[in-house]
Image: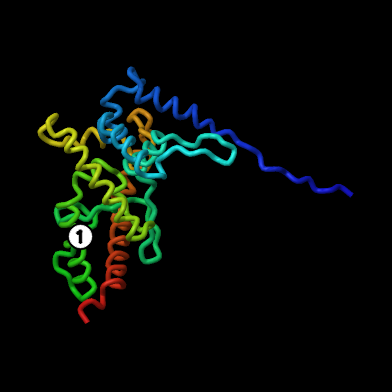
């Protein structure tokens, strides 16, 4: 009779030191691999401000401090932890959400009536008929105005603000938004003498809100572009999403006026 073998826990070396050294070489040393404009595009701020944030967090917040594990090995450096946190804000995860038991995989924008009926645009109802349509129009127009007034620049700078937040609870959403607002104010204070108006195109060009990787135009196949365009312009998907949102709004807020 063959006895079963017991597999011990294997130690997998993550080589954190090498990761820290590569990060330092790419962005933070005196002559880094990537120039300052690339740093600002990736981190959404200039290097001196980022290092100031790293220094403050590592001195005041235990999570961002470097610690040792049970074997005495150092964990991730403050620089690595701060880089990961900033990238989570700058590059949002893939979009997937469910409304009225239907799953959708594209982000959508609340717009006014001048936009076409594409799957990524959700307009109000200009002449709402019935209480459900009236409630949807009320909530859509109110939310759209708030977004337009408060989050235009934040959405351009931090992609995490663009995507639906259905996977997070209210407390986590609040922390994310506060973090983005604080970072934005620090960036404006740091750069207010360097430019007269914020140019958000430097953050948007060549980057995707669905992935942490930067894709060049040459790497996108023509067939992919046509497929994405057909999906975005799908009138049936637009109508279904809007109907699902109307029903969802009614289920949540339909009894407000009673």
In the figure, residue 142 lies in which quadrant? bottom left
> Residue visible at 49% across and 37% down?
75
State left or right for residue 64 relative to residue 204. right
> Residue visible at 70% across and 43% down?
8
* 11 over 112 or under it: above or below: above
Q: Position of residue 137 (x, y in %)?
A: 19, 66
Q: Between residues 138 and 120, which one lies in front from this camera angle?
A: 138
Residue reaching furthest to the bottom:
258
Q: Position of residue 176 (x, y in %)?
A: 31, 50
Residue reaching furthest to the left:
196
> Which residue is labeled 1 in the image?
143
* 152 over 83 or under it: above or below: below
Q: Between residues 238 and 17, which one lies in front from this camera angle?
A: 17
How was the colour assigned to the protein in this rendering? rainbow
In the figure, residue 50 lies in which quadrant? top left
* 44 over 173 or under it: above or below: above
Q: Position of residue 143 (x, y in %)?
A: 20, 60
State left or right for residue 175 relative to residue 3. left
> Residue visible at 33% across and 17% down?
31
Classify mark 1: helix, strand or loop: helix
Say if residue 226 shows up in the picture. Answer: no
> Residue visible at 36% across and 43% down?
88
Q: Position of residue 51 (x, y in %)?
A: 31, 32
* 242 over 26 or under it: above or below: below
Q: Between residues 114 and 12, which one lies in front from this camera angle?
A: 12
Quadrant of the image containing the C terminus: bottom left
Q: Between residues 62 and 14, which one lies in front from this camera angle?
A: 62
Say if residue 148 shows up in the picture. Answer: yes
Residue reaching furthest to the front:
59
């Amino acid at each position: 009779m063959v006895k079963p073998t017991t597999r011990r826990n294997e130690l997998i070396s993550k080589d954190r030191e090498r990761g820290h050294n590569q990060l330092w070489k790419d962005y933070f040393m005196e002559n880094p691999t990537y120039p300052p404009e690339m740093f600002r595009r990736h981190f959404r701020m200039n290097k001196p401000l980022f290092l100031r944030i790293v220094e403050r967090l590592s001195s005041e917040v235990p999570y961002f401090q470097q610690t040792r594990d049970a074997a005495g090995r150092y964990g991730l450096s403050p620089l690595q932890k701060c880089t990961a946190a900033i990238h989570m804000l700058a590059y949002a995860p893939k979009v997937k959400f469910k409304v009225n038991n239907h799953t959708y995989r594209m982000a959508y924008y609340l717009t006014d009536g001048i936009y076409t009926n594409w799957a990524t645009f959700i307009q109000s109802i200009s002449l709402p008929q019935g209480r459900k349509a009236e409630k949807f129009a009320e909530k859509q127009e109110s939310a759209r105005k708030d977004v337009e007034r408060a989050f235009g620049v934040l959405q351009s700078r931090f992609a995490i603000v663009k995507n639906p937040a259905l996977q997070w609870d209210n407390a986590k959403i609040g922390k994310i938004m506060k973090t983005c607002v604080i970072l934005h104010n620090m960036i404006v204070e740091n750069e207010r003498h360097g430019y007269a108006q914020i140019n958000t195109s430097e953050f948007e060009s060549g980057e995707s809100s669905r992935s942490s990787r930067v894709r060049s135009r040459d790497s996108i196949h023509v067939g992919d572009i046509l497929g994405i365009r057909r999906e975005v312009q799908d009138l049936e998907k637009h109508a279904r999403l809007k109907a699902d949102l109307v029903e969802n709004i009614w289920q949540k807020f339909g009894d407000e006026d009673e």
